[in-house]
Image: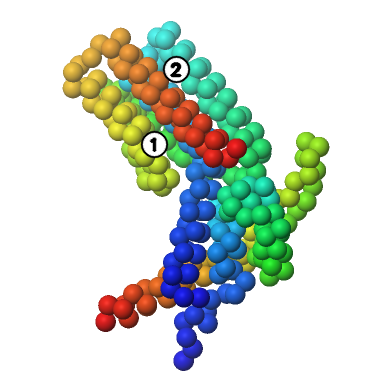
Amino acid sequence: MNADEARESLAFSEYARKRAREDMGRPWLALVLLATLSVASLSLTGAATSPTALFWVFVGPVGAGTIALYAYRRSRSSGLESSPLPYLAVTVGILILTYAAGKFGFAFGIPAVARFGPAFVAAAGYFALAWIERSWMVAAISFALLAVTVAIIGFDLSSQQSKALLFGLYGITLVAVGLSMRAGRRQLL
Amino acid sequence: MTHPSSALDDTIHQRVRLGILAVLSESRRADFGYLKEILEVTAGNLSQHLAILEEAGHIQIAKGIEDRRSRTWITVTRKGRAALAAEVATMKALLEGIGAAQRA
């Protein structure tokens, strides 16, 4: 084997590895994003104690459940089976840390930490995930969540304005995830 | 003293076989159709490469019927994962050696 052949083989195996990782991870990434974004939204809108919390509490998990079902079915039909465990671990990790950030704020009487801490933790979690997955989409959503949180703090936005921004972020996330999954499906078909 | 290239494993340093192991090492298992599509090879060609890898103990092949169609699932073995890691490390070391020699 000469140097050019070795380079070509290595590049090809790297391409195959990357493509397989993309094909497997896309739906599970969506699940992580939507499930944890719901929790971050609860604290940002201060909706945990109001009837609007029902939206974040029920629609988020229902959406996440639907995506999980889709991801499982797609994994079976695409011919590439992956383990959802790493993504489940990341989801649970982010949920526990966001919950802990909120509790910490209440316990030490720092309302700002209780309200904004979970969103910062979720954004940091997405950024770590983006690094691990080498995903620009997840990195962009991480920055968008960070920007929304900073805007809510910096401009002292009302609850209505905060919700509008978060709905916007949900919309952007859904469109980004949808387009990404559509692109992945086209590659597979 | 042996040449570093002697550490290369003949059964896996071929381009397609390296690709098969790379895909399988990322997943729990992959089916024949997926591998054929992603590696852009014919069914006959892929079958030959899979047979070589299976004989060497790098992969396991399971055939079955799912939703009234036959499917062939391929899984990488622990030996296969180790062999892939060793092969990639050896190839990278060889390329670094060649690069260093060219710069000198």
Which comes before the other along the chain, label 2 or label 1?
2
Question: Mark 2 is on which residue type?
Answer: Trp
Residue A65 in the image: state x and y as whole percent.
Answer: 57, 26
From the viewer's perspective, is A92 left or right of B102? right
Q: Output the chain of dot 1.
A: A
The residue at 72%/68% (across/down) is: B55
Residue occupying the point 44% across, 70% down: A4
**From the viewer's perspective, is A13 left or right of A77?**
left
Image: A43 above or below A2: above
Structural crowding at the residue carrying mark 2, measured as other residues with C-alpha within 10 Å and reported as few (<14), some (14–19) or many (≥20): many
Residue A107 visible within the image: no
Q: Nearer the viewer, mark 2 or mark 1?
A: 1
| Kind of residue at disc 1 | Val
Is the C terminus of chain A in the top left, top right, bottom left or bottom right quadrant? top right
Q: How far across and down, in percent of the image, does residue A72 sit?
A: 62, 35
Circle 1 Cα neighbour tier, 10 Å, few/some/many (<14 / 14–19 / ≥20):
many
The residue indicated by pointer 2 is: A56
Relative height, residue A141 to residue B71 (above, below):
above
